[in-house]
Image (cartoon, grey):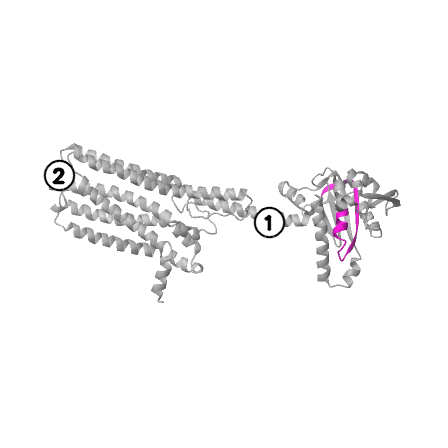
Amino acid sequence: MTRLARALKWLWGTAWPLYGATVLVSNLLGAVAIMAFIHYLIPLPEGTNFGQSRFDVPSIGIFYVVFAVIVGAIATYYLFKPVLMWQRHPDEHDRNMVRNLVMRIPVYQAIIAGVVWLIGIAILTIVASSVSGRFAAVIFFATLLGGCAVVLLTYFEAQRLVRPVATQALARRFEDSTLEPPVSHRMRLTWLSTTAMPIIGIMLLLMGQSVGYFTDEPADILPAILALCVLALITGLLATTLLIMSVVDPIMELQDAINRVRRGENGVAVDIYDGSEVGVLQAGFNEMMRGLRERQRVRDIFGRYVGTEVASRALEERPTLGGEDRKVAVLFVDVIGSTTFAVHHTPEEVVTVLNEFFEHVVESVHEHRGIINKFQGDAALAVFGAPVSLSDATGAALATARDLQRRLKDSQLECGIGVATGNVVAGHIGGHDRFEYTVIGDAVNQAARLTELAKDTPGKTLTSASTLRDANEAEQARWTVLKSVELRGRQEMTQLARPIRPTLADRS
């Protein structure tokens, strides 16, 4: 396949053939309509027509139409050639240059059409001047007003048709709102092409009739006035529809995207294809969604380190050093014989088994609305009642301890579990540049001491009688009180308690 054949095949697969055909047909229809209006509807005096001209007007008209089509197509091609090449080889062209050119295609296309129309108006006016100055004035104003309306409609058509290409050019980011006329200017252009131009034409017809430019019968200009009224209705519908598309379409797309975000979707984005403030809104929405996704990513990663509750509070409030007095329940889990296990296994195996072990711990703690405050090597500290208050923090901690007994019974690792309740200081501890959320108090120490004893106790789970009394009655019924001991570092006796075997009710 030749290079030309490949280029034609690629070109036909894009939106450019439709774009070129639409712009060409609209301008040709506009030219035909204007000439038919002049020839059939303007009541010129007898002897005032192109037939009186010394030029072959039909031949000139046909020649100029062909000339205008060729020149317009060539000018359009060379002006937009970088865009065509960029679409075929995106990495070989400056994206900013292409973006600016793409967004100005409607304006440039209107300028090209305007130049072609001005040349045609000049030729027709010169031809008409060979008949009379009066005839030349009629031709000039009629073609000028009609040409302006066609050029403005060309702008709106080009803006609508270039949208797929603009979406490609602005796929990443857009911050410049000056690449296209703002919405207010588009509305003024719509009024100019659909209201002002026909009204000016009617005013000129009435003024021409009053000064004798046309026939002596005033009623003869009524068909021309009716035609201008019909033209205003048609162009008004067309231009207003195109204006609505340029403004309402992106608004509807934004509304749909917002509704999708409300339904929980976080990968939402809208196409950017407008070079005015509307495009800034589209880009702003996409930037906002990127920020939300990044914030959610930070929240997710942060939550994995410090717990979702702590992360949410830190993101919503500015964390400061210090803490508050809170009554909480503390659960301490410590692996038994981890040093011996590490000696007989590779580091990779140790990490894998520990991760599987702590996965059960994390799931159980979260299910009972607690947080994992920290991991300390082969141990974990869970807190219930801070930073989010719980109505029965002690009951939740004790239920978690019993649940962990069940979950970890088949694990390769054994562990001791201790639960204690008491007042602690819960808050951010450390320096201004580096701190963490933690709890400090006797309950933490007591839970750690209970864990040490639990390693040598059947069931390997212990709490104190005072902690047990703070739980709900249903949870108390699942524990049994043991002897009193003196915990390491404490000078008072602590009565122990451990879970009883599951009852028939529990099994059911």
Q: Residues within 10 Å of mark 1 (few under 14, many from 20)?
A: few
Q: Residue at x 19, y 45 (%)?
A: 125
Question: Dividing the image into 4 quarters, which one contains the N terminus?
Answer: bottom left
> Depth check: 269 or 391 in front?
391
Q: Please, what secondary structure does the residue beneath circle 2 have?
A: loop
Residue 74 bears which disc, if any? none
Can residue 93 be seen by looking at this rendering? yes
Say whether residue 278 is left or right of residue 157.
right
Residue 297 bears which disc, if any? 1
Q: Quadrant of the rendered structure where residue 399 is?
A: top right
Question: Where is residue 83 drawn, in percent x and y?
Answer: 38, 56
| Amino acid type of the residue tagged 2 in the rendering | Pro
Say whether residue 150 is left or right of residue 343.
left
In the picture of the structure, the residue carrying the numbered disc 2 is: 45
Please say whether residue 390 is one of the residues in the magenta stretch. Answer: no
Q: Please, what secondary structure does the residue beneath circle 1 have?
A: helix
Question: Where is residue 34 drawn, in percent x and y?
Answer: 23, 44
> Depth check: 350 or 201 in front?
350
Say whether residue 304 is left or right of residue 406.
left
232 to 58, vertically: above or below: above
Question: Dividing the image into 4 quarters, which one contains the C terminus?
Answer: top right
Say whether residue 309 is left or right of residue 483.
left
Q: Residue at x 28, y 53 (%)?
A: 72
First to last magenta residue range:
401-427
